[in-house]
């Protein structure tokens, strides 16, 4: 008599003899080294992009909307024509979309730590920062994809920069490097705050003013002086300027150095901080 | 395998602010045994496990796990342990198979070996059909089974299981118990935290009862139950009129009777099933209608009442707090 319908996958249970066999049959290998452990965690990050593509969608839809809205609504008014405005705004939007994505590195780390899986990782005989480094390697791929989507959108809308594909690739590369460095700020935040939602809110509270009070959308020469002086030193402005220079020509070498110096500085401060907080648990 | 204890801890202390989560714990767990830590929520069980698994530094005290000092040689400790946390320690955004491959790769297994191992474990743990589904679609019981499978991808010398059946339905609980028994038969050493006396009784060779961060009693399950005063046979009669006659009969057959608030119910201290059966048979022979009866093990509450004089209270779950 069939008492209850059985969904095999839910009710199969375990095979005791097989469990006994399984735990006696495995020799213990040497644990993965630093590089190999970090790469394994990078693989995990990429699997997440595959399984949860919404994460990538979330962060690319906003910039895509901005490109379309700003170009066609304000383009004529701000820059004289939509085509000219697209030339101006696209390199900046590239910066914005990738920088937005970095907040999610902190959210993902917070999710790991607040759920049980973080405890398991920390109880493994592996290099302790491996989950962090690996996650950021995986995240860099997400940054690259987010930027790539914006560039493809630009090309579809008629964006044709003077330096062509090479300039676009160089700008994308620099933006990803900067974002890798910036993401350590959000991983620190991810370890200090209690919930993923708190990290998301705090992250965007910081990143929104930084991206809007910059030269991403408008030429700062029309702004009041006090605001201009902030916009000029805002690293997001400098990165957006370099990104424009690399695509359209006329890049300021000093600005490239500044961007790289800021990236090194952020990493030097926040990578050890994240690692310490992570070790402390 | 050496014969030294798997865990030797003395004087462990850990407090979070005002709360003394672990308040002077000494513990010895022999290799090849299952040791149960029994206590209510907030008793300090999870904090104790996190200290022994090198996730948390104790404020004071010392411990050797698998012969290695947890403070000075945590890497050597981690090389031999595995941890199944209180909330399933698996990645919900990956499939079951990917979770096992991830752990296997991190533990240094080669690509082909880890694939075969993942398939073998999914099969053994009854998850082969669900292996390629994301873990977030799993039921609680499946998650737990995967969690334990992840802990044995490379067979550990010591397993920490933190409340492996809390929140599971009875059927899933039995499945997890079967797995733990199979691990024990295979020679695993396990430190098991639980809120259920029955679970500790079923699985553990020795039990420490913890309350407010202290070990308040220690012994084999039999010793512990004996010290608590065994279980009770509870009987509910069809007719309350029969109660005094039933009480007299039970007193003669078993021992001191307690009359319950329900006028048709009474109970008698009794841990022997045969004796309970003959007592019920005796009632039937005398023509006393029995509506319902049960022979219960002492509950955690009764253990606590007997050991501490107060019932197990749920403290704020500050233990193992994530900052």
Image: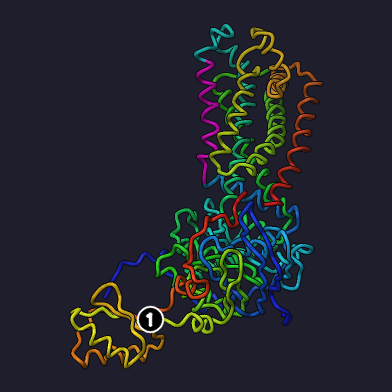
At numbered mark 1, what does the secondary structure look like: helix, strand or loop? Answer: strand
State the residue at coordinates (67%, 51%). Answer: A131
Nearest to the observer: residue B179 or residue A174 = B179
* Magenta region: A52-71
Q: Quadrant of residue B77?
A: bottom right
- Could you tell me which chain the residue with mark 1 belongs to? B
Q: Main secondary structure of the magenta part?
A: helix
Depth order, front residue of A278/B300: B300
Instruction: Give residue B44's position: percent from left, percent from top.
Output: 59, 62
Label 1 neighbour load within 10 Å: few <14, some 14-19, many 20+: many
Coordinates of residue A199 in the picture (x, y in percent): 58, 38
Q: Nearer the viewer, residue A196 or B92?
A: A196
Residue with the mark numbered 1:
B232
> Residue shown at 46%/75% (left/top)?
B198
Is residue B315 visible in the rendered structure shown here?
yes
Identify the colour scheme used: rainbow
Magenta highlight on residue A214? no
With respect to residue B151, does B253 lie above or below?
below
Measured as percent of width and height from the top left, residue A209 is found at: 61, 23
Residue B51 shown left or right of residue B94 in the figure: right
């Amino acid at each position: 008599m069939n008492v209850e319908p059985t969904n095999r996958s839910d009710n199969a249970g375990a095979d005791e003899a097989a469990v006994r066999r399984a735990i006696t049959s495995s020799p213990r290998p040497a644990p993965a080294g630093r590089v190999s452990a970090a790469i394994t965690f990078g693989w995990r990050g990429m699997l997440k992009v595959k399984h949860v593509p919404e994460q990538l969608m979330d962060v690319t839809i906003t910039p895509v909307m901005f490109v379309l809205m700003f170009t066609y609504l304000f383009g004529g008014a701000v820059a004289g024509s939509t085509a000219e405005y697209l030339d101006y705004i696209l390199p900046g939007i590239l910066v914005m979309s990738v920088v937005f994505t970095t907040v999610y590195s902190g959210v993902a780390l917070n999710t790991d730590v607040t759920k049980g899986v973080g405890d398991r990782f920390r109880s493994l005989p592996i290099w302790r920062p491996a989950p962090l480094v690996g996650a950021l390697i995986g995240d860099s791929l997400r940054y690259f994809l987010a930027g790539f989507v914006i560039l493809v959108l630009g090309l579809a809308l008629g964006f044709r920069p003077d330096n062509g594909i090479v300039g676009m690739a160089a700008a994308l590369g620099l933006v990803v490097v900067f974002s890798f460095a910036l993401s350590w700020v959000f991983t620190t935040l991810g370890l200090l705050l209690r919930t993923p939602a708190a990290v998301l809110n705090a992250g965007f509270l910081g990143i929104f003013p930084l991206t809007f009070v910059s030269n991403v959308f408008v030429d700062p020469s029309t702004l009041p002086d006090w605001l201009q002086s902030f916009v000029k030193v805002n690293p997001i402005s400098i990165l957006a300027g370099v990104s424009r220079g690399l695509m359209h020509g006329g890049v300021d070498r000093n600005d490239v150095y500044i961007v790289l110096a800021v990236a090194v500085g952020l990493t030097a401060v926040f990578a050890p901080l994240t690692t310490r907080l992570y070790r402390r648990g | 395998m050496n014969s030294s204890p798997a865990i030797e801890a003395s004087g462990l202390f850990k407090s979070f602010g005002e709360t003394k989560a672990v308040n002077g714990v000494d513990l010895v767990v022999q290799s090849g045994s299952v040791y149960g830590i029994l206590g209510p929520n907030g008793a300090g069980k999870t904090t104790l496990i996190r200290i022994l698994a090198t996730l948390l530094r104790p404020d004071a005290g010392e411990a050797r796990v698998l012969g290695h000092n947890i403070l000075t040689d945590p890497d050597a400790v981690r090389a031999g342990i595995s941890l199944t946390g209180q909330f399933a320690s698996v990645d919900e955004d990956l499939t079951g198979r990917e979770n096992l491959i991830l752990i296997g790769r991190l533990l240094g297994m080669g690509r082909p070996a880890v694939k075969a191992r993942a398939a073998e474990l999914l099969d053994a743990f009854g998850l082969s059909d669900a292996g390629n589904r994301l873990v977030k679609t799993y039921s609680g019981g499946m998650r737990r089974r995967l969690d334990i499978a992840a802990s044995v991808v490379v067979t550990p010398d010591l397993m920490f299981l933190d409340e492996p059946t809390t929140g599971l339905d009875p059927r899933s609980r039995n499945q997890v118990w079967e797995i733990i028994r199979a691990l024990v038969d295979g020679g695993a050493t396990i430190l098991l935290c639980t809120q259920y006396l029955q679970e500790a009784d079923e699985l553990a060779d020795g039990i420490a009862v913890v309350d407010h961060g202290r070990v308040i009693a220690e012994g084999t399950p039999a010793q512990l139950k004996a010290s608590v005063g065994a279980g009770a046979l509870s009987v509910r009669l069809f007719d309350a009129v029969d109660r005094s006659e039933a009480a007299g009969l039970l007193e003669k057959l078993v021992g001191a009777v307690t009359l319950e608030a329900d006028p048709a119910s009474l109970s008698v201290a009794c841990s022997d099933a045969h004796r309970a059966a003959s007592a019920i048979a005796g009632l039937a022979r005398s023509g006393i209608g029995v509506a319902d009866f049960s022979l219960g093990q002492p509950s955690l509450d009764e253990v606590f009442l007997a050991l501490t004089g107060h019932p197990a209270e749920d403290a704020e779950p500050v233990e193992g707090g994530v900052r």
